[in-house]
Every structure is written in C-alpha cells, then in structure tokens.
Amino acid sequence: MIFAFAVAPVVLVTLLIGLRGVAAMRTTSDFLVASRRVSPLLNSAAVSGEYLSAASFLGVAGLVVKDGVGALWYPVGFTAGYIAMLVLVAAPMRRSGALTVPDFAEARLASPALRRVAAVVILVIGGLYLVPQFRTSGLVLSVVSGTPYWVGVVIAGAGVAITLALGGMRAATYVQAFQFVLKLVLFIVPAVWLLVAVGPAVRSDAVHPVEFTRFERDTPVTFRVGVTMDVSEPTSVRTDGGPAVLAPGPWQVAAGTRVIFPAGASVPEVRGEPLPGGSGWQRPLLDLQNAGYPLLGTWALLVSLMLGTMGLPHVLMRFHTSPDGRSARRTAALTVGLLSMFYLFPGIYGVLARVLVPHLYLSGATDTAVVAMPAQVDAGVAGTAFTGLLTAGAFAAFLATSLGLVLVVSGAIAYDLLPGGLGALRIAVFGASTVVVLLALVAIRLDAGVLVTWGFTVAASTFCPLLVLGIWWSRLTVAGAMCGVLAGLLGSAGAIAATLFGPPLSGWPAILVAQPAPWTVPLAFGTMIIVSLRGRPPAWAAAAMLRLHLNEDRAASGGPAALRDLRHSTRSTRRSSTVRRSLGRLVR
C-alpha cells in the first residue's frame, strides 16, 4: 500500500523527467554539465534538491533522538558551508571552464597524475555519500511497508541508474529541482500536522524532556542488527518464540529478533549509548563518541561540514552548469536561502520523535523516526496518508542526491580515469550503481549521518585545500598539491578505518579519530604550502589564475597582457584538459 501510494509515483516521475533529457544529450558536455545553460534559480533549486540527502531529510531528526539537541549543529554546518563556497569557490570554478574537479586540477597545474588522484578521491567521497542514501531507502521502505531491506536498496539503485543513463545532467537538473519543491512541501506539511495532532501534552514533553526509562505503551521493537544491551531489572517480554523474562545483566539480541516490551517495563540500555532525554541529551553541544568533550566534538563536526561542502564534487559540478561565473555566484547565494528554509524543520521532527518513538534507538533505526511518527499519532487514514507523504519525500531525497553522486562518480571513471564517450559514461553509471547497491546491502548497521559526515571529512581534507590554494595562491606546485591531497586522503581514510575496525578509544583521542577534520585539514593545507615553497610554480601559473578571477566579458575581449603569456605554454603543453583547451582558444 505505502509502496504504491508513495514510492512508485516518485520513481515513475523521476524516470519520466529523465526522458526529457534524451533528445538534448549528444556530447560529453551535455551529459556532465547540461551544456552550461542552467539558470541560477533552476540551478539553486537543483543544488538544494541534490544537497538535501537522507542525512538531511531523515538523519538529522534521527540524530536528535539518539544524540540530543546538539545534533542540530548538523544543519548549521550544512548551510554555513555554502557561504564559504559563495565567497571562495563558486565563481572561479565556473570561470575555469572545467567539467569536473579532476579536470580543474589538471588544468591548473598541468598534471595528469594529479587528475587521476583527484578522480580516486571522488570515488572515495562518492562511496561514503552514496551508501547511506541507498541504505536508508531500504531501511525506510522495510519499516513502512514490511518489504525486505534489499528491495528499497535495489529500487533506488535502478531508478538512479536508468534516469542518468537516459538524460545525464539535464535530466538530473530537472529531477532535482522538482524534488526539492516536493521535499519542501512533504517535509513542512506533515510537520505542521504533527504539531497540531499530538496535542498540548506531547508538545510540552517535547520541550521539557525527561530520560526515557519506561515504556509508556506496549512497544514492538525489531532488531535489524545484533546488539548488546544491559537489563537493569527482571523484565517480561514477548518474542517470536513466546513470552520470556529477561534477567538483570547483559542481553545479547540477535539480528532479526522482534521483541514486544509491555507498558511500564524498564528500558534496557544499549551499551555505549546514553538513554534519550537525559541531562546530556539536552546539552546544546554534540558529545561525539560520548567522550566527554562536547565543545571539541561540536567544533570537529563544524570544521568537517563547513569546509567539506566546498569540496563536495557533486555540488561543485553543479556550478559548471551555470552560463558564467556571475550566475554561479547567484546560484550559491540562492541556495543558502533555500537550505535555510528547509532546515527550520528537522529540529521539530527530532524533539517530537524523542517523545513519540524513543524506542527506535534500541534497534539503531532512528533514521526512520520521521516516517514512523504519523502512525504513532493516528492509526487511521490520516496517519497512513502522512506516512506515505513522508516516505515519498524521503525517496525523493534519496534519488535527488544519488543522481548527482552517481553522475560525478561515473564522470570520474569514464572521463577522468578511463576517458571515453557517452557510451562509456552510461556503462559507468550502471557499474557504479551496482557497486553501491552491493555495499549498501551490508551497511545496514551504520548511521546515515555518520557516513555522510565522513564523506564531508574526506572532501574537507583533500579538495578544499586544493581548490582554495589553487584558486587563490599562485605558488602552488604539482608536488605540493599531490602531497597535500594524498596526506589529507590517507589521514582521513585512516581515521575512518580506525573507527570502524580499530580498538575502542575514549576521551579526546576518540573524537579526533572519529571526526579527524580538525587535524587532517591543517595537515593537507600545511603539506601543500610547505612542499610548494620548496619548488617553483609553472611560468604560466599567474596567468592561469587570472582567468579564474576575471569576469568573462573581460577575458573574452582579450584580458590583460598576462593572459597572452599563455600562448607559448598552451601550445607546448599537452592540452588534454577542457580548461587548457579554452585557454589556448582565448589567447589566439
């Protein structure tokens, strides 16, 4: 019922809009950047639709349930990053004439090797960002309709692959702009309904939280992953095997177990996780890893999100679809306003979910809190209808973000690593989607918000230094850029691997390993600067930078004399990059 009412129309409309781009897609530029003809208003709606991922639509509210109101720093970081992008990156990136971030890297420093390294970084970021989109689509559909987890994952993967193969960036632009409007409506209207329907008592409980220690009603909990919990007192429950009494002490729950806790029963504690609603839950800071350093944890998150936004390859590619640098800057400015409007509401869902569905933290399914609430408020037609609307909005979030990510990953494969035409790009789309689906099938136990934040961390540690210094510092060298990108990549990826597979840590080291941006970003910047100062930049570096900062009308009329110095370098250097080809045309 929910699938037919909510998910199927969103997937169908996505595919139909994808057909719109078929006739207009004839070249690689059409596929990757929609021939650079997207207006600022349409582009900002598409950027917003692409950026509002599962972590925004569902993940923030789920993190509020689990980690407390300090999780509201996530939307602050998500939005503030665009201000830095507006000031430092948007217009120069568009003026570069590049199609992808690796394309810009090679053009700026004339290094095919740096281009390949940047393409590998895109694959890492894309994997960390895409897996939670597909993973949450499977989780949400299984919660609201009872289908197996893999069904939602496969539906999301197939819808994204077919849409992109049909229409490329042009189709993605129309889909993402449409889905931003859809997500905005389907997020705001149910929020207003929930606030009215829950009544004054629940609204009061939402703003005066107490620790979740007793079940208020008979509560079924399905554990999709295995977990260890501590039982504080003898507790009678019902399982698939019949009634049972839990003895005080540790309790190992196997994956797939369904337990019904009776009203008034004591809530068992998940090892390593505080109960929702306690004193720490109300603190307006984020205590990462429960390490006891909330201020450090909050700053670590903000550094990752704000600087990571400047380096997200699927967002940067969006600015290349603008007609000129001025349009790219307008796109970034409009995007800040649109995102700010959306992010007024995740906090409402989060504090209501702590009252209505706090038990989701037991099973690690807090990402589904938004779609689980309407049924708790109204078991009739209204609850079902609003569950369907929120599920439709959630799938729109999965698809819109996944379109941009799969597009940029396929571009890294078939344009930067293994250059090919439209056929190669289409094959790469299906190949990338298949790999991400397989990864998502085994990533059910990982939080969407955590995975997405790691994607931001890698972007902040690699592309942010490369772009900022490449755009604003003429002395950057190939060796400096290469060493800095590799240092940031190895540092951030190593920290992520240590978090997943290493021994548990405590205190501030746990924060700096789980969220390494405070040290990996300075490491990358410092490495680039120190290594570059020991070498010499290419002779045409200053002239190449002028192109990034001159308005297009001045560049088109010939620009300053420094641009003419490029004539020799562009003729004597292998011009595989889009930017260097355009530089050659400019000076002739």
Image: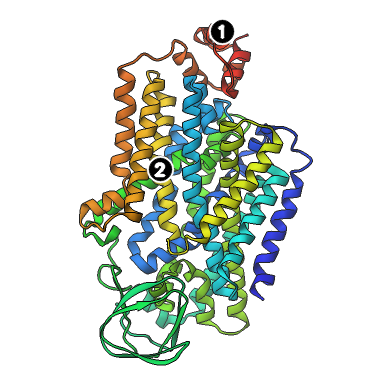
Q: Is residue 47 left or right of residue 523?
A: right
For residue 567, the mark is: 1
Q: Secondary structure at mark 1?
A: helix
For residue 67, the mark is: none
Figure colour scheme? rainbow
With respect to residue 232, does 410 lie above or below? Answer: above
Q: Is residue 287 left or right of residue 384?
A: left
Mark 1, Cα crowd under 10 Å, few <14 / some 14-19 / many 20+, is some
Q: Residue at x 71, y 37 (%)?
A: 423
Q: Residue at x 48, y 33 (%)?
A: 118
Q: Which residue is mark 2?
A: 458
With respect to residue 536, does 165 lie above or below? Answer: below
The one nearer the camera, 224 or 449, is 224
Residue 482 in which image quadrant: top left
Q: Secondary structure at mark 2?
A: helix
The one nearer the camera, 88 or 168, is 168
| Residue 513: x %, y % from top left | 29, 50
Query: Which numbered disc, 2 or 1, marks the residue closer to the eye?
Result: 2
| Residue 85: x %, y % from top left | 45, 38
Residue 46 visible in the snapshot: no
Residue 179 in which image quadrant: bottom right
The one nearer the camera, 536 or 251, is 251
With respect to residue 228, does 337 lie above or below? Answer: above
Figure quadrant of the N terminus? bottom right
Identity, as a three-letter code, of the amino acid under mark 2:
Val
